[in-house]
Image (cartoon, helix red, strand yellow):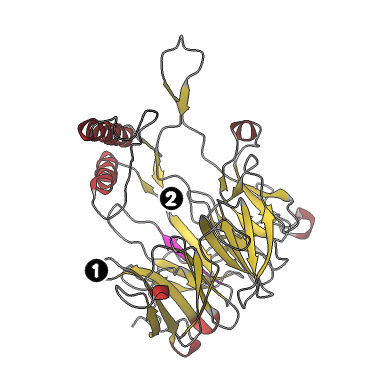
């Protein structure tokens, strides 16, 4: 075994006639040191936007997505306001794009935002069942329809250099489509001419047995999959040359795909997944139930009256129905299925310098560290759990945008810059 200091394990997936084969016939992988090298990148705050009281544009209803363009201009998608807030690289307000509505160029239920390499802005809108395209100056350009039956892109959505989109999630896909789907978790490429294709079928753990609701003598039954804890992640990032960094497994294994979806390289570190114990199961159930019961502004379950006139159902009956819905939700958590191991990686992202940020998992209530590496296999170091996290968006020249909440629970966007454009500074 060859040990290369400062590099992660890199497996080159090339034809065996062009690569040295190991005893099992597969490519030989170099091994690396399995210890973390702490780094603490120096940063400076550039600006923060979002206030309790102020101009209409800066009182955010709900920020669903943010993105930078090549010049460092920040685009903030406020789905409740139905518009995009545009902020220049100095933090000054430029304009808003679009508004709530059903007309051309208006937004109904926007969930994701992308900025293409040519400067166009795309908004994935569930209500419009497609992508709304705008110029950088805010002019409405076109609408690209998506088939709800075949599935619309979810969130997040990623723009590729050829102006197509990648989505690891499908929304609205029909039951018949799901039944006929290939094994695995499909990552779908959507093109702006309305066509689509499966870009890559990511690995998936064997599905658990479904739960049936209703008497067996009924003609129809409701079938629901049990809740699963610690499912393998499905997270990706796009490199400047169009390659895709993808994680879809339990171990520390990052696949590098070419623009056609073919796996070209695999980056690994010898980090062992944590085995799931009964104590971990109990802590995860308790965490999810506490989140379900929390009064943090989110509504985990809702009850609506079906039929009759408004007011026919008493408030007490509605409260009883809500309590029953909460009880069922908690029972589903208690019956949750656990894998035997916690995946090593929680998510990944790629910055504008093609560095791969790897957020590692941690136990319930804890934050894991973040590795930073390059696509050619160089391990740059690990940011401790109390340091920088993967941002909501990476910008040029070391810009990072974080969506946060202030002391009054108001959403805001904080933009920082890696000092002097440098990512790494010795943690010592």
- In the drawing, does residue 151 fall left or right of residue 214? right
The residue shown at (28%, 71%) is 406
Is tag 2's residue or tag 1's residue first in the polypeptide sequence? 2
Is 362 positioned to the left or the right of 242 in the image? left
Vertical relation: 367 (above or below) 231: below
Labels 2, 1: front one: 1
Tell me where residue 215 appears, x and y as whole percent.
41, 13
Q: Disc 2 versus disc 1: distance between alpha carbons?
A: 35 Å
Residue at mark 2: 343
Mainly helix, strand or loop, the magenta region?
A: strand
The residue to which callout 1 is attached is 408
Classify 237 as above or below 135.
Answer: above
Q: Quadrant of residue 307?
A: top left
Q: Residue at x 33, y 37 (%)?
A: 303
Q: Residues within 10 Å of mark 2 (few under 14, many from 20)?
A: many
Q: Is residue 399 left or right of residue 367?
A: right
Q: Quadrant location of the C terminus?
A: bottom left
Is 124 or 185 nearer to us in this picture? 124
Residue 13: assigned label: none
Residue 165 is one of the magenta-drawn residues? no
**Whole-percent x and y of residue 260?**
73, 57
Quadrant where the N terminus lies? bottom right
Q: Which residues are magenta?
A: 355-360
Q: Position of residue 241 (x, y in %)?
A: 69, 71
């Amino acid at each position: 075994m060859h040990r290369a200091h400062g590099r992660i394990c890199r497996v080159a997936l090339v034809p065996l006639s062009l690569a040295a084969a190991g005893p099992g016939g597969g490519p030989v992988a170099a091994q690396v040191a399995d210890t973390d090298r702490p780094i603490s990148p120096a940063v400076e705050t550039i600006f923060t936007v979002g206030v309790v009281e102020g101009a209409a544009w800066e009182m955010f209803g709900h920020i669903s997505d943010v993105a930078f363009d090549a010049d460092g201009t920040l685009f903030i998608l406020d789905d409740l306001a139905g518009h995009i807030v545009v902020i220049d690289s100095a933090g000054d307000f430029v304009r808003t794009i679009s508004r709530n509505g059903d007309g051309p160029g208006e937004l109904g239920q926007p969930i994701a935002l992308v900025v293409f390499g040519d400067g166009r802005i795309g908004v994935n809108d569930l209500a419009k069942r497609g992508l709304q395209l705008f110029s950088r100056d805010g002019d409405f350009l076109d609408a690209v329809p998506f088939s709800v039956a075949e599935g619309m892109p979810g969130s997040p959505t990623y723009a590729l250099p050829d102006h197509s989109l990648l989505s690891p999630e499908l929304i609205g896909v029909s039951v018949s489509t799901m039944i006929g789907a290939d094994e695995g978790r499909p990552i779908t490429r959507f093109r702006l001419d309305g066509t689509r294709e499966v870009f890559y079928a990511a690995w998936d753990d064997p599905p658990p047995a479904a739960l049936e609701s209703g008497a067996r003598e009924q003609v129809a039954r409701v079938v629901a999959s049990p809740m699963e804890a610690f499912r393998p992640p499905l997270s990706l990032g796009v490199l400047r040359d169009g390659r895709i960094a993808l994680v879809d497994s339990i171990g520390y294994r990052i696949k590098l795909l070419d623009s056609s979806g073919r796996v070209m390289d695999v980056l690994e570190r010898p980090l062992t997944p944590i085995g799931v114990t009964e104590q971990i199961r109990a802590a995860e159930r308790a965490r999810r139930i506490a989140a379900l019961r929390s009064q943090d502004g989110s509504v985990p379950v809702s009850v609506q009256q079906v039929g009759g006139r408004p007011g026919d159902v008493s408030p007490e009956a509605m409260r009883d129905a809500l309590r029953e819905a909460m009880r069922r939700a908690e029972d589903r958590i208690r019956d949750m299925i656990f894998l035997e191991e916690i995946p090593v990686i929680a998510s990944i992202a790629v910055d504008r310098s093609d560095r791969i940020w790897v957020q590692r998992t941690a136990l319930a209530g804890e934050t894991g560290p973040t590795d930073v590496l390059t696509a050619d296999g160089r391990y740059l170091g690990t940011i401790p759990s109390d340091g920088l996290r993967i941002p909501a968006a990476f910008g040029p020249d070391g810009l990072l945008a974080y969506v946060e909440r202030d002391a009054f629970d108001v959403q805001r966007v904080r933009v920082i810059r890696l000092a002097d454009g440098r990512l790494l500074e010795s943690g010592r």
